[in-house]
Amino acid sequence: MAKLNENYLDLKDSYLFSEIAHRVNAYSAANPDKKIIRLGIGDVTRPLSPEVIEGLHKGVDDMASSDTFKGYGPEQGYEFLRNAIVDYYNRNCVNIDAKEVFISDGAKSDTGNITDLFDKDNVILIPDPVYPVYVDTNTMNGRKITYINANAENNFLPMPDPNVHADIIYICSPNNPTGAAYNKEQLKVWVDYALANDAIILYDSAYECFITDPELPKSIFAIEGAKKCAIEFCSLSKTAGFTGTRCGYTIVPMDLKVMTSRGVEMSLNAMWNRRQSTKFNGVSYIVQSGAAAVFTEEGMAQCKANVAYYQENAKIIAECFAKKGIRYYGGVNSPYIWFECPNGMESWEFFDYLLNEVQVVGTPGAGFGENGKYFFRLTGFGSRENTLEAVARIEKLL
């Protein structure tokens, strides 16, 4: 009889967003006349920018001629896109090498797949509340997870405890779901902790494009010493609206090396390259052609205009809670607004209340961890019309 990976028994029965979809679909079926406004899942609504569309068309046209046709591409990504990302980092005063850049179909895949590089006996340090993928992918591998509390007392920006040892550390900044973002001084403390513990930081910067405060770093590699202890993941899903197009990238520094139990020094860059070459055939040429257009001067301007649109939505939602005197986080340097459920309600209770009373869908904080039990997340990724209507409904309800 085949033996299964029984770690799956330790997973929750349903992925957070699957449960949300189940509840919303059931309500919609019972109330077909009600207009539901969805501000829950972090999916974008603005179309791809004209520059990106032109880049995608160029990729399609190239596939139509034997002179420019592309078959299997490099698993690491085409040089033209890797170099464009290097230039983007340089413009943000961070130096990386193209050999450190790996193109993927998104940060979700890579933050899960990166666990292939690490032994299951590593101690994983994960903040609570947190993006569920970090927890679930490690649970699937049977790893021990230690949680660090992110809460109102520390503004949802927990700092390391020098008395607690960890081998792998997950950090997302600006954070999903709370919208909180670490400054340089705080990240330096994390880098120093990782170096002192011979630990690796897995840094998710998927929302860096929402940072407007110059004091907040867009990359962990802006911090001294980070290249010796950190891997960075980023995505074009939010930067350029690629949630359906699928393209992201992971930065694995050449300086990131670990000594094995056999006394052999191993390069994580080389290991990731080996893993990708074995398990991944690369992102399509057409998508990479469109992605490269993101990093042109015109492409960046157009993408920033879309991001600004979502930032204004987030501001509109945040102002609603400020007016009502409800404690909230995020809404600045982040597309997410993380707020305390009114009247002591638990988050799933508030989810059903919001859906049933005003037909607005958000994300229950409990789905992100124990510390989210009394909090709720709304996103700025809706249309302006729907955002304004949702806010008007919520204001009446509260």
Image (cartoon, helix red, strand yellow):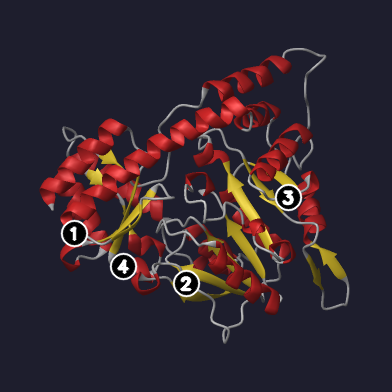
Q: Of label 2 and label 1, which has the lower sequence position? A: 2
SS at mark 2 in the image? loop
Q: Residue at x 53, y 35 (%)?
A: 240
- Count neighbours of disc 3 (C-alpha within 10 A) and say few if under 14, some if 14 to 19, many if 20 or more: few
Marks 4 and 3 sit apart, C-alpha to C-alpha, by 40 Å
Q: Residue at x 16, y 55 (%)?
A: 324
Instruction: Identify residue type, mark 2.
Output: Pro
Q: In the orientation shown, which residue stands out farthest toward the left?
A: 396
In this view, the mark in front (2 or 4): 2
Q: In the orientation shown, which residue stands out farthest toward the bottom?
A: 163
Is residue 225 rendered to the left or right of residue 144? Answer: right
Residue denoted by label 4: 373
Q: Of label 1 and label 3, which has the lower sequence position? A: 3
Which of the pair 389/362 is nearer the observer?
Answer: 389
Residue denoted by label 1: 325
Q: Of label 2 and label 3, which has the lower sequence position? A: 3
Residue denoted by label 3: 95
Instruction: Identify residue type, mark 3.
Output: Asn
In this view, the mark in front (2 or 1): 1
Q: Residue at x 12, y 50 (%)?
A: 397
Marks 1 and 3 sit apart, C-alpha to C-alpha, by 43 Å
Marks 4 and 1 sit apart, C-alpha to C-alpha, by 20 Å
Which of the pair 29/209 is nearer the observer?
Answer: 209
Callout 1 touching callout 3 (CB < 8 Å): no
Q: Of label 4 and label 1, which has the lower sequence position? A: 1
In this view, the mark in front (2 or 3): 3
Is residue 344 rendered to the left or right of residue 212? Answer: left
Residue denoted by label 2: 158
Q: Residue at x 40, y 47 (%)?
A: 335
Name above or below for residue 130 compared with residue 393. below
Marks 2 and 4 sit apart, C-alpha to C-alpha, by 17 Å
